[in-house]
Amino acid sequence: SSFPPTYAPPRAFCGQARAYAAASDAMQLVAPSRFLDGIVFAVFLLFVSGFGLFIFGEFHKMCVITEAKKLGYFATMMDKMFPFAKKQFVFNLTHIILFAILISLLSMSHHPAQDILKDEAEKRRKREEREEKEKKAAAKSD
């Protein structure tokens, strides 16, 4: 039984409790064997996030400080879109973690193009199967 020895469920719920215990054993939400994969992915994602913010910071510095005179109105627009104190792009670990969460959420989204590609592949497979059957039928009739 999956209940602690001190707990005895009422008689009416014994069947339901056993069914729930069996279902919970069959359907496992956390796979301990995938912990290392998750840790490696999280560390990789933090590096990608931090590198992305660093590159954006360098781009911001180039637009707003280094090449501001050459870029003219674009430099002003960039400074107005991203107003930072002393025109310095600053980020910390909180920003890196939040950006990593944003990247992972956007990575999990389902794009409609995936459905279109799947449907086209299924149509192509069915067409090829139909053509194979037609060839076999034509070969049998000859």
Image (cartoon, grey):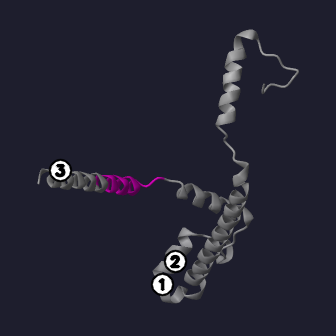
Q: Position of residue 6 (x, y in %)?
A: 88, 21
In this rendering, position of residue 66 left or right of residue 132: right
Instruction: Kindly report the distance in space between the C-alpha atoms of the residues bearing marks 2 and 3.
Output: 72 Å
Q: Secondary structure at mark 3?
A: helix
User: Which quarter of the image is occupied by the N terminus?
Assistant: top right
Q: Contact (CB < 8 A) between labels 2 and 3?
A: no
Q: Position of residue 142 (x, y in %)?
A: 11, 54
Instruction: Kindly report the distance in space between the C-alpha atoms of the residues bearing marks 3 and 1.
Output: 73 Å
Q: Which residue is mark 1?
A: 72
Q: Which residue is mark 2?
A: 76
In this picture, which residue range is highlighted in magenta?
A: 110-123
Out of 62 and 138, give the one closest to the viewer.
138
Out of 140 and 134, give the one closest to the viewer.
140
Label 2 Cα neighbours within 10 Å, binned few <14 / some 14-19 / many ≥20: some
Q: Position of residue 83 (x, y in %)?
A: 60, 70
19 to 132, vertically: above or below:
above
Q: Which residue is mark 3?
A: 137
In this rendering, position of residue 89 left or right of residue 77: right
Q: Contact (CB < 8 A) between labels 1 and 2?
A: yes
Q: Is residue 95 visible?
A: no
**Residue drawn 63% across and 71% down?**
53
Instruction: Kindly report the distance in space between the C-alpha atoms of the residues bearing marks 1 and 2.
Output: 7 Å
**Residue 70 covered by magenta stretch:** no
The rendered magenta stretch, by its main secondary structure, is classed as: helix
**Residue 115 covered by magenta stretch:** yes
Q: Looking at the image, which residue sits at the far right?
A: 6
Kind of residue at disc 1: Gly
Out of 55 and 103, give the one closest to the viewer.
103
18 to 98, vertically: above or below:
above
